[in-house]
Each structure stands twice: as structure tokens, then as C-alpha cells.
Amino acid sequence: MSPVAGLAGVSTMGNRYLSLQPGILVLLLTLKSAVKNPRASAPTACARWCPLNSVCVNATACRCNPGFSSSSGEIFTSLLESCDDINECGPPSPVSCGKYADCQNTEGSHFCTCSPGYALASGAAAFRNASENTCQDVDECIAGQHKCHNSTICANTVGSYACHCRRGWQPKSGFQNKQTNTTCEEMSFPAWTMPSGIKSKSLLHFFERIQDLSRNFMVVSAKDTIQGLIQGVDELLATPGDLEALPHSEKRCVATNLLLGLENVLRGLSEALPSGFNLTINASAGTELALEVQEQGYRNTALRQNRAEMQLNWDLVHESGDSDPSVVGLASIPGMGKLVAGAPLAPEPEKQAVLNETHKGLQLGPPPILLTDVTSAFMSKTDTQNLSSPVTFIFKHALTPGPRQKVFCVFWEHGEDGCGQWATTGCRRVDTSDTSTTCQCTHLSSFAVLMAHYDMQEEDPVLTVITYAGLSLSLLCLLLAALTFLLCKAIQSTSTSLHLHLSLCLFLAHLLFLTAIDRTETKVLCAVIAGALHYLYLASFTWMLLAGLHLFLTARNLTVVSYSSVSSFMKWLVFPVGYGVPAVIVAISAASRPHLYGTPTRCWLCSDKRFIWSFLGPACAIFSVNLAFFLMTLWILKRKLSTLTSDVSTIQNMRMLTFKATAQLFILGCTWCLGLLQVGAAAHVMAYLFTIINSLQGAFIFLVYCLLRQQVWDQYRKWFKSFRKTKAESEMYILSSRAVSDASKPSTTQLQQKREESSTQPLRLR
């Protein structure tokens, strides 16, 4: 080995030795520690390499402190692991601090604080979990923690606060009301300009007066300004001057401007009135204003005037989350009728269809007339087009609607061209009496009650003659049939009893129809007549159903069930069903909608809200059931006839049953079915068929169930013979009585002789 190589080897060994010095040093310290503490050398010695925020478990494992975690889990053995902070406030399982509180994470822990606007009831700044949560709203206004401008009033809200303008103040330009930075100024008179294109000195003078009110307006004198405004409108409409000479289209534009402008100005000026303030103004020409300012908490309120009243729930007036006082007002303007006279009416398509149905046969006469004053309703809330509950209006009127007149609850609908017309959308008539009309609307605007007049179209004289002649003949036949069913003992049975009650119901219904269907002068009487007709015709259909059921049972049993042998089930069934079911239907209909009995032209059921189906529904159901009975009866008879060959009497009975079944369906079913088919091009033909068959219904019943029965003819002969015998005996008795009377009287000759003898007797005595 060369010296250089030896030197290199020594150098290399030296470097290795130097690199082993730290390890040797640690080993020596460990041995020293083991000598001093023999227990530490046991297998349970702590690992010296555990990272920050952890503790050793043994010589080979470590555990993270609470609030920290490693990627390997709670205990780890890798030298590369670290203990990182656990975010208790974040996913996947955040700590719940409860309501109105937020979680705040810290190094190895967390704490909860109340959300802004809330504080713990104890006054502490933090808490650990939801069980310690006592966060409650902080009233910043009372605590003085708000930053509201001195032109506003602080109002506490849940978790925060809002700055409201004072009564009679409004937000400055660039600010919004009810914000934390709201700044306000005294309100000004609401803008109201004259409609363009209208040349009228009277209207110009009125708007000059409005400008004077605007220039002199002060918040403290808001009441006087409102009174001056009402007086100005009243004087303008009391003496409209050249406004009356304007075309109707321009008059409607002026009316729209006045109604909208007055409503807007009154809503704005009322914001300056204090809470709890009630204002009533009666102008000289009849214009009235009723206004009320109230806080939250009121439920129902009513504004009353001489000829109008408004009833509403106070919750409608308040906007959601608004704690300011709210305003509701009602202004009656009788002079407005001069401007809206002759304005068109645009009813809803559904109401127009009902109108056409209920006034079928009527023609619209003169334009609708204004039955009441024009009344404007307003409130502080501007969005009043779709209220959650309807507002009730009661209007008084001097005119009494007649039987040919229809009453509408209407409002003034503003058109895109600045003009307007009457409309009915969202309004309905609840009731009308001789002196008042009650309306309900789901929006606010300017309202009134219109009365439309209808002229009766000329009725078909042929149908009228057929109706009266046929019903008169039916009445006679029904009366004879009822007497026959009642007095003819030879035919009395369950079937006879059913047809007796059917004849009585039809007789009374037809008699009432002929004599009282047009008695529309008195509404109460007309409603009673309509209810009676409803009941009698329903009872007729019910007895028809029972007759159809009995005919089906008879055909199935192949025997004629006598009245004495009828089952107890049938006995107890007929009268409750025949008279009770129609009574229940009419009672429910009358209790639910009594105002729909009687129409302007007929004492019958109105078609409004499909009320006519309280009659058509049961009638169609009975007709359908009877049709099923009819088909089953024909099937039974066909099957039985095919098995009969020699029993002639049975075959005759079966044929008679078949004929009666067909006749009953034709008489008591098809007639009303034809009435339902009066639509389209065939309506005229169906009307004739319906009138002819239905008006002769009683005649058909008398023919089928009386004249075509041999027992009835035998009974008629007995009655006729008995009548002739009684008449002959009566005549013989009268003749014999006269003979006896004549025999008992002295003759004329005998009387003369007696007189002569009496005259000569005194001479003989002398």
C-alpha cells in the first residue's frame, strides 16, 4: 500500500467516524438513561419521535391530542405522520351550536357564538354546544346599538333592525325606506297632472286648484289638504261645465284620470296622518270620504257611508313584515256618473256564458245604467290586485231591479289608452234586494253596481199553443188516471199505487207550471215556486224509478204482484224514497244556494255555478238506471217468451209487460232526454219533439195504464150503468113525487063549487 493510499484510507475512516458521532452520542445517552432508570429500558418506553400535538403510547406508537387527528387514525406508528387540527365546525360532522348561533374553530378545539343581532341570556360571549345555547334577539333600538339617522325611527327586527321614515316623511333620493342607512325628508304633495289631449276650462281650473294645494302643502296640515281636495273634486263634478260637452270617449279618459289621481293622492297624503286617526268628510254635492289609520292587531274593520259600506280583514291592509300604521279609505263620488254614463261593460267570458244561459230568449236592451254611486277603495299597500281574501261592499240604491233586469258588480278597468270601461273580473254579486246590493271583490279599485235591461224575444207561438193545449189535456188525463187508480178496486196493486203517486206528482207539477212559472214579480214567491217545481219534478222521476224497479221485479218473477202480497221491503221502501229523497235534495240545494232559485224570466233554477244540475243530475241518473232496468226486462221477457209455446194467457201477459216497459221508458225517459238534446242545429226540432211529447205525458199515462186495461173498461161500464140506474131511479122518484103531490091537491071545479056554496049559504039562512 502506498502512502497516499494509506492516507486516503485513514481519511475515509475518519469521515465515517465523524458521520457516526451523532448516532453514537444518542446511544451513549440512552445507555446512561437506562443505567440510571432500569424501568425505562422495559418494553413500555415512550417513542421519542412522536410529532407535535401528540403523546406517545409506547416505544413504537403515538396518539394525537384531542382536537387533532392523523391520516392513519387515532394511533399511528409511522415516523412520517403528523397531527393536524380537526375543524369541528366543518364537514363531515359539524358541531351543532343550536338556533341563532355560529360555530368558531380554534387550534385543537372550538366554541359557539350567537349570530349577529343575538346574544346569550347570561351575557357571556361564547358557549360550547347547543345544550348551552340561550341566544335571543337583541333589541338594537333599546340598547342604542343602531345607526339610524335622526330623520328616521329605529324599529327592531329579528336579528337586526330597520330605520323607518317618520309619519309624513319619505326617503331621500337614492335611499330606500326600512334600511339601516335610510335617510328621510318631509314628504311632498303627490304628483297629479291633467290628462293630455283634453280641452276643458273646467278641468284646467280644477288642476290649477290642485297646484295651489301642492304648493301650500305641509305635513302638519295634511287633514286640511285632504278636505280641500275632496271639496275640489265635489265642486268639479257638481258643475262640470264644458266637461259634459266632451265626446263619450274623452269623458271616460277624464274619469280614469280623476279616479286614479284621487286614489293616488289620498293614499300619499294619508301617510302623514297619525296612527289611530279616523277621518270622515261629507262635501256639499254628496262626495264622501271615510278614512282610517290603525296599527297592527286589528282584525275586521268596516268603513260606512250614507250609501256605501266596505268590510275587510285588517290583515289585508298590512304588508308582510311592516310594523308601520296602515291606511284604508273609501271615497264615494256620485258626480262621477256624469262622466261614465254609457260606458261599455266587458264581463268575463264565463259570466257572459252564464248570462246567455240564464237569459236565454232575452235580448240586451238599452246600455247598462249606473245603479249606485262610483266608489273608490284604497289602502296604503299598493299591490291590491290579488288579495288573499275578498273585500265586501254593500251599496244602497233607490231603483229596484225588475224581473227583466240583471245586476252586475263592476269595477272601473283602466285601459292602455288612458281611458277605461266597466269590467267584472274578480268581482261577484252576493245578494241583491230592493234597496241594496252586496258585492265581493278580490282586488281594490273604483266600484259600482250596474243594472242591465233585457227585452223578451218573441216566443214561438206554435210552441206556446202546443205547450198550453198539451198540458191542459195532460192535467185532465192525469186527474182521471188518479181517480181511476184510487177508485178502481179491480186493478189496485203495487203497480197501481206507484202510478197513482206518479200521476199526482205530475198533475201538481204541470198545474204549478201552467199557472205560476211566470210569477217573477215577487222574488220570494218566485223562489218558493221554483223550489216547489224542483221538488215535484224530482218526485215524479223518483216514482218513475220505483215503477221501473217494480216492473223489472215483476218480469223476473213472471207474476203480477198484488198490492196485498207485496213484500214488506217494498212497502217500507216506496214512500221514503218516493217523497223523502227529493225532499233531501231540494233541502240541501235550498240551504246551500237559496238565491239561485228563480230567474229574471222564469220561476225555475238558475244556471249560475251549474246549479241546474241539482235537477239534471238526479234526473239523468234515474233515466240511466231505468234504461238499465228496461234492457234487463226486455232480456228476461225475450228469454221467457222463447220457452213458452201453448200458454196463451201467459204469453199475453208477457207481451203486455213488454209494451208497458217500452211505453214507460218512452213516456218518462225520452221526453227529458230530448230536452237535453236541444243544442246545435237540431235544437229547434228537438224543442218541438220535447214540447209535444212532454206536454202529452199525462194523456199517454191515462191511455196506457187505464184505457188499455180490460178491468178498467169493465169498471167504467159498472160506473156508467150505476150512474144510469141512479139517474133513472132519481127521475122515477121525481115523477112519483109529483104524482102524489097532484093527487093530494083538490081540482079547480071542486074549489069553484065550494066557493058558490059558501056564497049562497047566508041567503038560505035569511
Image: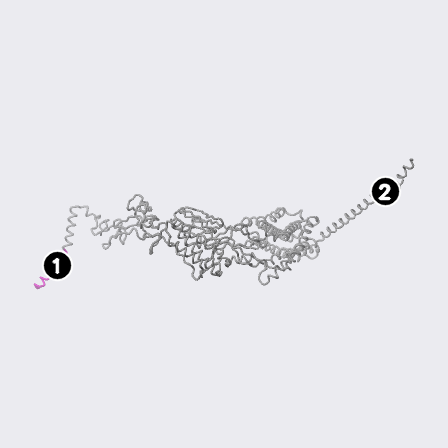
Q: Tell me if residue 5 is in the magenta stretch.
A: yes
**Residue of label 1:** 15
Looking at the rendered structure, the secondary structure element under dot 2 is loop
Please provide the residue range marked out in magenta: 2-20
How would you classify the magenta stretch by its main secondary structure?
A: helix
On screen, residue 281 versus residue 674, left or right, reads left
183 or 650, which is in the foreground?
Answer: 183
Residue 719: x and y, percent? 74, 49
Residue 507: x percent and y percent? 65, 51
Q: Nearer the viewer, residue 651 or 59?
A: 651
The secondary structure type at the circle numbered 1 is helix
Q: Please name the amino acid that badge 1 sits on.
A: Asn
How far apart marks 2 and 1 lie (CA) works out to 194 Å
Quadrant where the image shows the C terminus = top right
Residue visible at 57% across and 59% down in the picture:
363
Q: If you read the primary sequence from the N terminus, does the residue marked by circle 2 or circle 1 appear first?
A: 1
Q: Quadrant of residue 206?
A: bottom left
Q: Amino acid at mark 2?
A: Pro
| Percent x, y of residue 714 | 73, 51
